[in-house]
Amino acid sequence: LDGRDGGTGWGVVALKDAKEGEVMIRLPASTLLTYDDECEPALQALIQKVPAELWGARLGLRLLAERAKGPESRWAAYIGLLPIQFKGIPMFFHGDAIRALQYPPVSVQVGRRCQFLIDFAAKIAQVRGTKDDPFTEAEVDANALGWALAAVSSRAYRVAGPDQPAAMLPLIDMANHSFDNNCGARPHDDGGIEMYAKRDIKAGEALLMNYGNLPNDFLMLDYGFIIPGNPHDYISLRFDDVLLENARMASRMSAEAFGDLENLPRWQEEPLEKLGLVGQGVRNVEVKLGGEKGVDGRLVGALRILYARKASEIRDVPLRQLTDLDFSLSHGSDVRVLSTLLGAAAVAINGFPTTLKDDAAELIKLVQDPESDDNMRMALEFRMAKKNSVMNVLQNLSNRLKALSEEVKSADGGKMVSKQGNGVDKPKGFGTGGPTRSG
């Protein structure tokens, strides 16, 4: 390939100028590596043992079966160009690097993936050398499965639709990622796939695809890289009484009347059920801080519901407004909700064992050390990005709370109101001109 894309690795570039809509690469159906009816019965039987949601593992088995064929495989040349190792993917991190992530949701996911590889490798070992062995007696252990899963997760597309098998797309899958991508992929009438220009492209320009508006969790788990300042990055928090109480304590809102998740009146329980936060079978629900919205709307709605003193305060308010951070319910509610959200963000940032200042100093040492561990550096950059996303939320919420206080002060003729501001309504949303409603 002709050059590199900004140091991010080998990629695909345009060999000539192209106009918007022009086809850059077209792959006939025969070049797509997928799992379909074409697979041998023994391979199909093994694929069916993998849960449908683990589509990457299903496609990985097909990849291993083709690799076992050697030069006889239709995809031999393509498979020979795949990396031997996939750097930056946590599934291959050592223990210290996993712990350095400081983020349990990713650590748990890595553990689950590794356990699946070990367990499924044992199933494959049971059929090795028999008529049910789809790998022509080639040894397929957990390491081989890990390689295949990494190859698939970092390269496969589901262009044909969410309900259709994913496919590996030779050459197209060499395109690097950008949220501001200049190319897209779409099915062709002949069953193949084509990459097309989403805007005019100059000769020599890298062809970039959007792998999805994903947080750094999934970019790192599946592709082996993160994006500092990723606008889609967020931190997950378990929604339960512990989070709510800690957030209220951190924001000094513990004295305010507040609903108990274990003993709610029906007028509070019903809207929370509609938000999917409580109810029969609801367990381990997570809410998000960060991302494009800044705060998970469900958490905003839950706080408004739980702080409500009587049903009439929320009865006629649609859920879409209760969950909208820009909507104003009443001054008192706005203050309590914003303060508690600030408390939740503080709880999140304080949950990390190191500070951003500590991380920055450690990163400098790793950068200056030519023998430093790349995985440790990736883990460090990952957790710094997580903390920065929460810090952005803290700043945004602080600005909103400050604007709210200034608006009320102005409306009161320059006089300060009480902290709770009971009975005083904001003239607009949380500083962004949202709709109003009397408290």
Image (cartoon, rainbow, N blue to C red):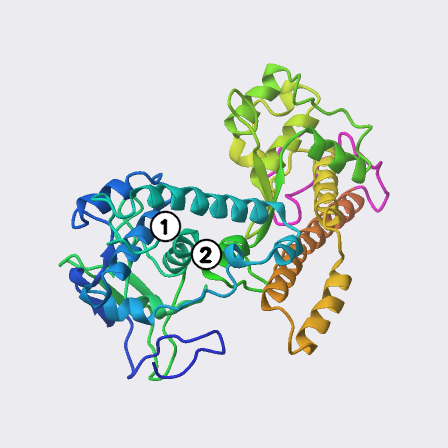
Above or below — where is 245 with respect to 344? above
In percent of the image, x 60 and y 40: which residue is there? 327
**As drawn, is 191 to the left or to the right of 100?**
left
Circle 2: residue type: Asp
Can you identify the residue that label 2 sits on? Answer: 222
Image location of residue 139, percent across then percent down: 34, 55
Above or below — where is 182 with respect to 186? below
* Secondary structure beneath label 1: helix
Q: Closer to the N terminus: mark 2 or mark 1? A: 1
Image location of residue 420, percent across then percent down: 80, 34
Q: How far apart are the two marked residues, 2 and 1, measured between alpha carbons? A: 10 Å
Q: Tell which of 147 and 273 is nearer to you.
A: 147
Quadrant containing the N terminus in the rendered view: bottom left
Can you identify the residue that label 1 sits on? Answer: 56
**As drawn, is 295 to the left or to the right of 401?**
left
Q: Tell which of 189 and 313 is nearer to you.
A: 189
Using the rendered image of the protein, determine whether residue 323 is visible from the camera's viewpoint. Answer: no
In percent of the image, x 77 and y 62: which residue is there? 358
Using the rendered image of the protein, determine whether residue 27 is visible from the camera's viewpoint. Answer: yes
* Other residues around mark 2 within 10 Å, as few (<14) / some (14–19) / many (≥20): many
Q: Is residue 423 magenta?
A: yes
Task: Give the magenta part as a residue range.
Answer: 412-439
Q: Main secondary structure of the magenta part?
A: loop
> Looking at the image, do the residues carrying marks 2 and 1 touch, with CB atoms under 8 Å apart?
yes
Image location of residue 421, percent across then percent down: 79, 34
Q: Tell which of 212 and 268 is nearer to you.
A: 212
Above or below — where is 2 with respect to 55? below
Which label sits on residue 38? none
